[in-house]
Image: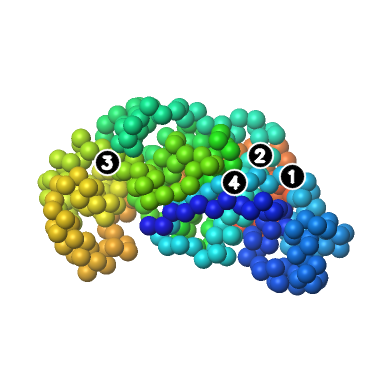
Amino acid sequence: MVHYNRTKPPRYGHMTNIREFLSFSQKEMAKALGMSQAQYSLLERGLVPPSTSILEKLKSLGFLESFFSTPLLQGHDFHRSLYKLRVKVAEQINAQTTQCGKHILQIRELEPTAGQSKLPSFDNATTPQEAAKEIRKFFNIPTGPIPNLMKKVEETGLIIVPMNFKTTDTDAQTVFFDQSFKIIFINNKKGEGDRLRFSLAHELYHVLFHGPDTISTKEIEGDANAFGAELLLPEEEIKDELAQGLTLGALAELKKKWGVSIASLAYRAKTLQVYKEEEIQRFYMMLSRMGYRKQEPVHIPREEPSLMRTLLANISNKKGGLNGLADYFSISVDVLKQIYPPEVLPGG
């Protein structure tokens, strides 16, 4: 599992954001704007302003002149990924999430409390496991499965945004715009509800304990996984249940109950030393032979966030519909639909 961070460079600005959103190279962007690459480089570096003709061409690409008058936040982000993302893919995701952060800042002008989380500090927790127990108490679910983790997190005010990432190689991303402004983004292309629950638990650890200056390490990611495992599968309860048998049928039943993948349950059995490592390896090999490492039995429905949809609907109502919403963000409706999936947008 690769989990890395990327901070926008000091010169990152509106033109860079547009180009990376479109997944263009500087050469391709220059061609789209009808200028030389050298001229475009000056434009992107902020050394020359866009001319009237350039602004018209940018409008045809979906970005209005007023797009340049609202600030872009300098975010610091973490990806939870299966593989290290290709540079262009990572840049495009970065551009999408940066625009969403910009949108939420604009939403705050009309909805001042948007994105203000009521999550308390758990600095006294000395281990990820203790932190997971404390957050369970805060959620008022000290024992048993958490029926809807997404809803519990959103009830704190933390915004979770489904995004149209153009890859299946990343599950989720947490972006810290500052210590108090954090957003969790989830990849709408990843459909497995059990994997989404663990990704959300993992990202929640970063929200609680990390910030814009945090540099991801193997130890930090291990702690986030340990937190997620204890949050979704408390040791005091799951250990005895796992001991009932390391079989596909037994773990499938536990998957139904706890909403966590069979592979994660087997790994939890390994870390809790319920079974020997060679027994776990044989179980994984059996899953592979049956094709269950890619597509497990027992479907766990996705838990869908609703807070961002509500915020966008409120602004849409105030601005006269989807066109008014896009105008408020200084982009075209087409660009708006490229950023957010239909179920997040008003009328979707």
Mark 1, other Cα within 10 Å: few <14 / some 14–19 / many ≥20:
some
Query: Residue 32: x percent and y percent?
Result: 75, 70
223 lies left or right of 176: left
Label 1 to label 2: alpha-carbon separation: 9 Å
Q: Mark on residue 75? A: 4
| Residue tagged 3 | 233
Q: Mark 1 and mark 4 in contact (Cβ < 8 Å)?
A: no
Q: Mark on residue 70? A: 1
Q: Is 35 in front, or is 147?
A: 35
Residue at (25%, 43%) from the top-left corner?
257
Using the rendered image of the protein, determine whether residue 304 is visible from the camera's viewpoint.
yes
| Residue tagged 2 | 105
Label 4 to label 1: alpha-carbon separation: 15 Å
Q: Mark 2 and mark 1 in contact (Cβ < 8 Å)?
A: yes
Q: Earlier in the sequence, mark 1 or mark 3?
A: 1
Residue at (70%, 71%) from the top-left corner?
28
Q: Earlier in the sequence, mark 3 or mark 4?
A: 4
Q: Earlier in the sequence, mark 1 or mark 2?
A: 1
